[in-house]
Image (cartoon, grey):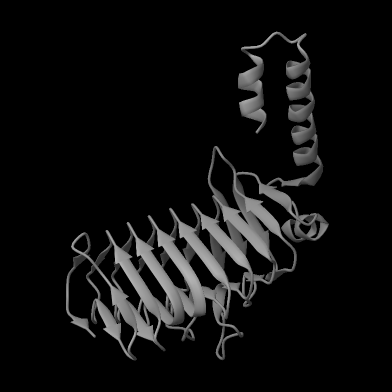
Amino acid sequence: PCDITSAILSFLEHTSSFACTCIWARDSVRRHIDETTVRVHAGDCVRTALLASRTNGIVRLDAGIHVVANGFEVLRSLQILGAEDGATTLFVASECCAFAIHAPHFRMRGIAVYSGIPSAPAYHPPAIVHIARGRASLEHVVVVGHYDVGGREIPPISGVWVGLGATLRLSDSSIVGCAGPGLRTDRANARVVRSMISFSTRGANIVARGGKLDVCDSLVCGSRGDGIALWSGVQVDLKRTVIRDNEGCVVFNHSAASLQTDRTNFFSGPIFR
């Protein structure tokens, strides 16, 4: 809004009443953004910033590596934004869920999320990012799973788990190398756009149980199980999506799911309906 207002002002005389109104609106928006934004420099305490943030506020992480000792529950609407001009990495050092989202609205953009290697049995819910309720948007986000390290046994853990009734929009993002499904939905609504979900080391890259799943302009590949596993009558719509190089099926329909595909998709492997 500030940029649009500035562009309008460049074509107007600043003495006009309309221009004065635009200046007041622009300054009000900028002041509101400044008041509701908490900036975190690399090395600062991310948890303190998250706790200090306001409802509908913004936590902006500067470029660099940010370490959080424990996972964090998001209980109010919030945006967590990475640096616009550099890579932002968030590493959760503990063996717990990195983010548990219980907020009505949540947005994360421009951040790579890693978490510590859990011991068996896994924490519940077993996911790096758990969207328990509300609406969440993950944009230009990378979620990196738990690779087998030194022969240590790792329990099944999802990259992103969308819970009952929650809604997720995953766009321009990657979920890679999880020791369980990269994306799991349980009677939820999920839309995947221009994203890659790949290299799950246990089971399918995507597991959907009930609800609705839309996958568009995306890549699903390289799992040690199926590309997509469908349960409990989930409604699935695939468009312009590539599913290939999975050890199992392209899509395995376990229980009468509704699967819509068209000729814009590319599948390499069998589809079990």
Q: Residue 143, how many percent across, how many down?
A: 49, 63
Q: Quadrant of residue 254?
A: bottom left
- In the shown orientation, is residue 55 left or right of residue 4? right
- In the shown orientation, is residue 100 left or right of residue 237? right
- For the image, the number of numbered tags is 0
User: Residue at 50% across / 61% down in the picture?
Assistant: 169
User: Residue at 35% across / 60% down in the picture?
Assistant: 216
- In the shown orientation, is residue 264 left or right of residue 10? left
Q: Residue 13, how many percent across, how many down?
A: 70, 8
* Residue 59 visible: yes
Residue nearest the viewer, comparing 54 with 21: 21
For the C terminus, give its image quadrant: bottom left
User: Residue at 55% across / 89% down in the picture?
Assistant: 120
**Vertical placement of residue 127 versus 54, above or below:** below
Residue nearest the viewer, comparing 63 with 219: 219
Q: Residue 128, how many percent across, how many down?
A: 56, 72
For the N terminus, give its image quadrant: top right
* Residue 199 visible: no
Q: Quadrant of residue 104?
A: bottom right
**Vertical placement of residue 139 versus 236, above or below:** above
Q: Residue 34, how many percent across, how many down?
A: 78, 38
Residue nearest the viewer, comparing 225 with 57: 57
